[in-house]
Image (cartoon, grey):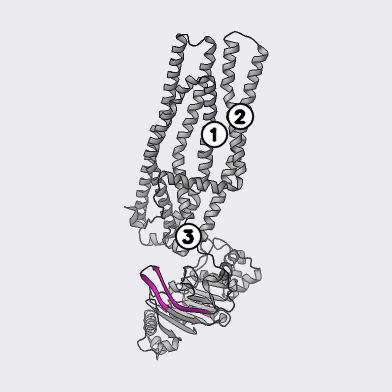
């Protein structure tokens, strides 16, 4: 089953080449390490010193062989000093490497922490339009898995490759000092390694990118399936989703296999072959030179040193080439993080005004999600402070769009919406959110206790929380739980009914003592008894808080001061319930009668209309 058939949309990542991927990774690294740049340079200095100390070992061995062993020069004190020096240098190099590992690993983990917080902070500031196209599982994967690319780049790629390059440079200098002619033979290894790395990148890069994408798709489907498990089981769709997941998983397996085959052929085995060939050539050249009398017995130590140095060169080269697999993955992960960070945040308001009374003025409001496809057409509306306005209309009439603009989830045309005379876009974000409460259609509850769900991270006192719960008529229920307000409500408020969840959401909205309260079809999923509780709560707020309620169930706004009827993005009718019901054949009357008919109360609706 194709991935697209079950909604496997993917967060946008522009196609980029290897140079662009490397640039994104480098920028992410520099930004993450900026606060601890000194630590990084100290770690590099320790690596240089460790490499220099390690390079002394074979040189000391050469000296022992050429000066003391072959000439049978038994100077025990000098031999002991050289051996002690080699031991001290080796121990010092090991200690430096340990310190470097601890230092740089800590730096890497702190960098990951900073990047992850930066990404999360950025996501919280993205406009709602981004989340309209985002897939939750893929977004979570970027915030968690892809930010690990920073640590991979540090610990398993950058530091290993840097360490290997330093060892390679130190060893090359030592060999050049001992015998530059033999050093040229060893240098022939480098072009061969470059060819291997180039071939590996070309073969493995597509598989690595595909692997990352498919892993993100797996996370997305898992999150989506868990969130909609009730619907999946009720519609008997579990088998289809299982087959789709298996198909994506199989594609992920094939991508991993392609990557592993490239690793198996081109990394360790090929370098081991080059190592053996190089040693054989080195011994042959050395033998020929010795047989021709070009070398004396005294220079056998050079052969010993070069044999050691070759192993020290091949191992760093092996480590460098083996890191390219991780480097490919890390670069893709870093590019995905960079793509997310490049998403434009919601513009920060200028903070030139305050919400004082809660008066709302809408003037010539036009809006379109996409150019050429307008949703709202020239809306004009004034909402007095402390009044109760209902907004109704058929599906697609523009109700939710209007509410989203009032809540600044999408940018309205400048000056089209004013609160207390100030353009809504000019009111500071913190003040605006503190002055406006919202009750969504689907109540969102944390996996926390009742007190935390009402406070929602705000510094509210116990009295404020309980006062808000009383205003929402949910205090008695919460206080009667086994641990009162400290009772855990379960994930998504699993311990509560739909109506109780909505009352908790209303209490949360009221806890901040807002001047304006928006309700987005807050009674569409609750029973009639709970709806009456909500209506009582709204009635108690009238005159003190400006209330704007988007309503599918028209009984919720029947008592509103004015009801706005939208039709295809325009205000079709405006008035009280009685005034609108008096319009024979009017849109509101038809909606109301149809809804009453659906609820089996046709007679009551006709009586109310008359």
Q: Is residue 291 visible?
A: yes
Q: With respect to residue 484, does 141 lie above or below?
A: above
Q: Residue at x 54, y 22 (%)?
A: 177
Q: Nearer the viewer, mark 3 or mark 2?
A: 3
Q: Secondary structure at mark 1?
A: helix
Q: Which mark is residue 178?
A: none
Q: Is residue 407 rendered to the left or right of residue 463?
A: left
Question: Is residue 532 visible from the viewing direction of this image?
Answer: no
Tell which circle, 2 or 1, labels the residue nearer the N-terminal end: 2
Q: Residue at (63%, 27%) from the top-left corner?
A: 91
Residue pushed farthest right?
77
**Is residue 359 on the magenta stretch?**
yes
Q: Position of residue 533 (x, y in %)?
A: 53, 78
* Percent position of residue 485, x then y: 61, 66
Question: Circle 1 sits on which residue?
Answer: 163
Mark 3 — residue? Answer: 344
Magenta residues?
356-378
Which residue shows up at 48% across the image and 77% down it? 549
| Residue 93 badge | 2
Tag 1–tag 3 contact (CB < 8 Å): no
Q: CA distance from mark 1 to mark 3?
A: 38 Å
The crowding category of the residue bearing disc 2, from other C-alpha atoms within 10 Å (few below 14, some 14 to 19, many at least 20), is many
Residue at coordinates 52% horizontally, 54% vertically from top-left? 119
Label 3 Cα neighbours within 10 Å, binned few <14 / some 14-19 / many ≥20: few
Screen quadrant of the C terminus? bottom left
Tell me: residue 229, above or below residue 325: below
Q: Nearer the viewer, residue 241 or 201?
A: 201
Give the mark, 1 or 3, whose residue is nearer the N terminus: 1
The picture quadrant where one finds residue 606 is bottom left
Q: Is residue 112 above or below residue 62?
A: below
Mark 1 closeness class: few <14, some 14–19, many ≥20 residues within 10 Å: many
Secondary structure beneath label 3: loop
């Amino acid at each position: 089953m194709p991935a697209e058939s079950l909604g496997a949309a993917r967060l946008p990542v522009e196609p980029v080449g290897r140079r662009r991927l490397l640039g994104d990774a480098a920028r992410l690294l520099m930004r993450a390490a900026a606060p601890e740049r000194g630590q990084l340079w100290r770690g590099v200095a320790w690596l240089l010193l460790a490499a220099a100390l390690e390079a002394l070992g074979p040189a000391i061995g050469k000296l022992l062989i050429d000066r003391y062993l072959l000439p049978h020069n038994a100077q025990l004190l000098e031999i002991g000093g050289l051996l002690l020096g080699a031991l001290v240098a080796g121990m010092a190099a090991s200690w430096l490497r340990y310190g470097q590992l601890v230092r740089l690993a800590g730096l890497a983990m702190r960098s990951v922490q900073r990047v992850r917080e930066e990404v999360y902070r950025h996501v919280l500031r993205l406009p709602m339009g981004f989340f309209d196209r985002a897939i939750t599982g893929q977004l979570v994967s970027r915030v968690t898995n892809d930010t690990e690319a920073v640590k991979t780049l540090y610990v398993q790629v950058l530091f290993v490759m840097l360490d290997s390059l330093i060892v390679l440079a130190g060893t090359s200098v030592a060999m050049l000092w001992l015998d530059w002619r033999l050093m040229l033979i060893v240098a022939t290894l480098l072009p061969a390694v470059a060819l291997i790395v180039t071939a590996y990148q070309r073969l493995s890069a597509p598989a690595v990118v595909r692997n990352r994408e498919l892993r993100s798709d797996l996370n997305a489907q898992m999150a989506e399936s868990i969130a909609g498990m009730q619907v999946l089981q009720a519609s008997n769709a579990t088998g289809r989703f299982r087959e789709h997941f298996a198909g994506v998983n199989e594609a992920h397996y094939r991508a991993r296999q392609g990557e592993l085959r490239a690793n198996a052929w081109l990394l360790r085995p090929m370098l081991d072959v080059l190592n053996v060939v190089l040693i054989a050539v080195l011994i042959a050249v050395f033998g020929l030179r010795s047989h021709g009398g070009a070398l004396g017995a005294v220079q056998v130590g050079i052969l010993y040193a070069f044999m050691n140095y070759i192993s020290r060169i091949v191992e760093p080269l092996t480590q460098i080439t083996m890191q390219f697999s991780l480097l490919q993955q890390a670069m893709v992960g870093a590019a995905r993080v960079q793509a997310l960070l490049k998403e434009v945040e919601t513009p920060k308001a200028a903070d030139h005004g305050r919400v004082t009374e809660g008066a709302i003025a809408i003037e010539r409001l036009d809006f379109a999600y996409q150019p050429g496809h307008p949703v709202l057409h020239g809306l004009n509306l004034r909402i007095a402070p402390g009044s109760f306005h209902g907004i109704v209309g058929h599906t697609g009439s523009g109700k939710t769009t209007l509410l989203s603009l009032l809540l600044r989830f999408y940018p309205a045309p400048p000056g089209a919406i004013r609160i207390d005379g100030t353009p809504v876009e000019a009111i500071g974000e913190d003040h605006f959110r503190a002055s406006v409460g919202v009750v969504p259609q689907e109540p969102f509850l944390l996996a926390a206790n009742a007190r935390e769900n009402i406070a929602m991270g705000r510094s509210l006192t116990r009295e404020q929380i309980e006062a808000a719960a009383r205003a929402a008529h949910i205090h008695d229920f919460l206080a009667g739980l086994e641990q009162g307000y400290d009772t855990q409500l379960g994930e998504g408020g699993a311990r509560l009914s739909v109506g109780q969840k909505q009352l908790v959401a209303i209490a949360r909205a009221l806890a901040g003592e807002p001047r304006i309260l928006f309700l987005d079809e807050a009674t569409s999923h609750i029973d009639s008894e709970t709806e009456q509780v909500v209506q009582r709560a709204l009635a108690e707020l009238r005159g003190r808080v400006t209330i704007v309620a988007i309503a599918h169930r028209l009984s919720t706004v029947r008592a509103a001061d004015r009801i706005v009827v939208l039709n295809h993005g325009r205000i079709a009718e405006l008035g009280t319930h009685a005034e609108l019901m008096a319009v024979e054949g009017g849109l509101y009357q038809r909606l109301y009668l149809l809804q009453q008919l659906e609820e089996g109360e046709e007679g009551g609706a006709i009586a109310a209309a008359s």
